Image (cartoon, rainbow, N blue to C red):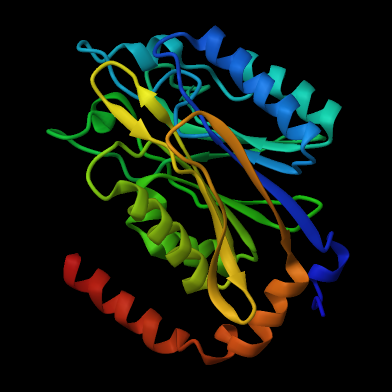
Amino acid sequence: MIPAPYDKYASHVTVGCVNFRSIWGDKAANLEKIKRFIVEGALQGVDILVFPELCLSGYEADEKRVLHSELAETIPGPSVDVICELAAEHNMYVTFGMPERDSEDKSVCYIACPFIGPEGLIGTYRKLHLGRPPMFTESECFKGGDAVPVFETRFGPVGVLICVDFWNFPELARILMLKGARLILNSTASMDAPGRPEYITQQTGARATENVLYTASANLVGKENTKSFYGHSTIAGPSFPRFNYIYAQAGYDEELISATLSFEKLHRFRDNVQIDKIRRDDVIMAEFEKLNSNRN
């Protein structure tokens, strides 16, 4: 049984994730590929489709750290407008990774995921935590976001996180759950290394188990300039009586995966676990306040 206030939403949703091979620096070509996957997703009955981090531009920075700034667009802007038209045509929700230019301060760019529905642009998530040298160049090219929004859909509130925000900061997924999200989309550019396919499986499943909700991670594939990505996009969540179940997973190649998820089954699990009733918010908040006081 689906409880109020969720009973006004659809009871099932088909979620899709794209293992996406970006053509580094070629925004026009990547936009065409995004469009083709949206059409393919519609043919497969996908309701919500998630693409990887910075798939519109390619993830890797150039030597002079100007590529993303040159390719950045405001939101709304030309690429978002194109996807809004397709989302309306196919009655679909779509989120994809892109470099966003601040509409007020043109010198500032963000790693962003616009969240688009049949009605148009609903909102934008900006990556909070930026990777630093020597392994990453994000902090040299972008500014971090400052909000953790949820987006209203006909399937209920949906959350979006980007890469490390999802992998390494589980507090953000918990915040989205507390705001009502039953589905969290993770747009990621996770680079290939030993054990990485197991990592995306483990972490996507862990965020779902911790919060008793569904999660979907979409990753890049292939090699850009010097960095390679391993795909293995994953859709996970509870499947009563299992605490965690991998509903779908891609491999190393470019492809679209999908899974139909039941909110009735999700709430069956929530009714048994009762995480909202046993969670000790008083202790958790008190400990956070102590930590913040010590940091200051």
Q: Is residue 54 left or right of residue 271?
A: left
Residue 69 vs 291, above or below: the answer is: above
Q: Is residue 79 left or right of residue 210?
A: right
The front one of 54 and 288 is: 54
Q: Is residue 118 visible?
A: yes
The front one of 88 and 146 is: 88
The front one of 262 and 115 is: 262
Q: Position of residue 87 (x, y in %)?
A: 77, 30
Q: Position of residue 241 (x, y in %)?
A: 62, 82
Q: Position of residue 130 (x, y in %)?
A: 30, 39
Q: Residue at x 39, y 59 (%)?
A: 203
Q: Residue at x 17, y 72 (%)?
A: 294
Q: Residue at x 52, y 66 (%)?
A: 208
Q: Is residue 120 visible?
A: no
Residue 106 vs 185, above or below: the answer is: above
Q: Is residue 89 left or right of residue 193?
A: right
Picture quarter with the C terminus: bottom left
Q: Position of residue 79 (x, y in %)?
A: 62, 17
Residue 188 vs 270, above or below: the answer is: above
Q: Residue at x 80, y 41 (%)?
A: 45
Quadrant in the picture for residue 252: top left
| Figure label count | 0
The front one of 110 and 222 is: 222
Picture quarter with the N terminus: bottom right
Q: Residue furthest left?
A: 134
Q: Is residue 166 left or right of residue 37?
A: left
